Image (cartoon, helix red, strand yellow):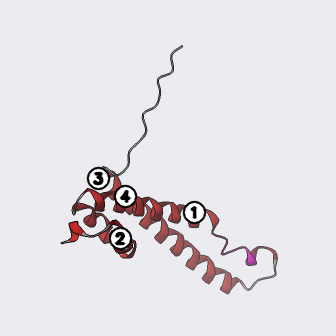
């Protein structure tokens, strides 16, 4: 039944699947594989962008701060970044194992 759904419905379903189950959905058929690949790339990029833009500690850089609150925020920040990184690496590993990362061939440079 899953292999007969319209692409629009597949897109909606795939967008709701958690990271840990996402790649399993690619086994249905080639349409699902393509949708899962696109969703996985989107999530991977989102993790990378979020990690790159994180500015949680900015308010504490210029002001006179309470070091206890700084330690709490800093610990939370480290755990949050670690979690995002783990999620990003998980998606990358699963994509690699399932042939979802395709490098474009480089043109040979002739001297």
Provide the secondary structure element on which disc 3 rests. Answer: helix
Residue corresponding to mark 3: 97
> What range is drawn magenta here?
54-60
Question: Which quarter shows the N terminus?
Answer: bottom left
Image point 34% across, 57% down: which residue?
A: 34
Can you identify the residue that label 4 sits on?
37
**Going from the N terminus, do you reach mark 4 or mark 1 first?**
4
Which of the numbered marks, if any, corresponds to residue 34? none
SS under mark 1: helix
Q: Are marks 4 and 3 in contact (CB under 8 Å)?
A: no
Q: Residue furthest left?
A: 1
Numbered disc in front, either 4 or 1: 4
Residue 70 vs residue 111: left or right? Answer: right
Label 4 Cα neighbours within 10 Å, binned few <14 / some 14-19 / many ≥20: many
The quarter of the picture where residue 29 lies is bottom left
Q: According to the image, label 1 marks what residue?
A: 49
Residue nearer the viewer, 30 or 59 = 30
In magenta segment, residue 2:
no
Q: Which residue is mark 2?
A: 14
């Amino acid at each position: 039944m899953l292999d007969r759904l319209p692409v629009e419905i597949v897109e909606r379903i795939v967008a709701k699947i958690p990271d840990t189950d996402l790649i399993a959905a690619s086994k249905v058929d080639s349409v699902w594989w393509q949708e899962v690949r696109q969703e996985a790339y989107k999530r991977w990029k989102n993790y990378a962008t979020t990690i790159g833009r994180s500015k949680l500690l900015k308010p504490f850089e210029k002001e006179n701060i309470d070091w206890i609150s700084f330690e709490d925020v800093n610990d939370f920040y480290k755990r949050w970044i670690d979690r995002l990184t783990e999620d990003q690496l998980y998606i990358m590993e699963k994509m690699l194992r399932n042939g979802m990362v395709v490098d474009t061939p480089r043109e040979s440079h002739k001297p």
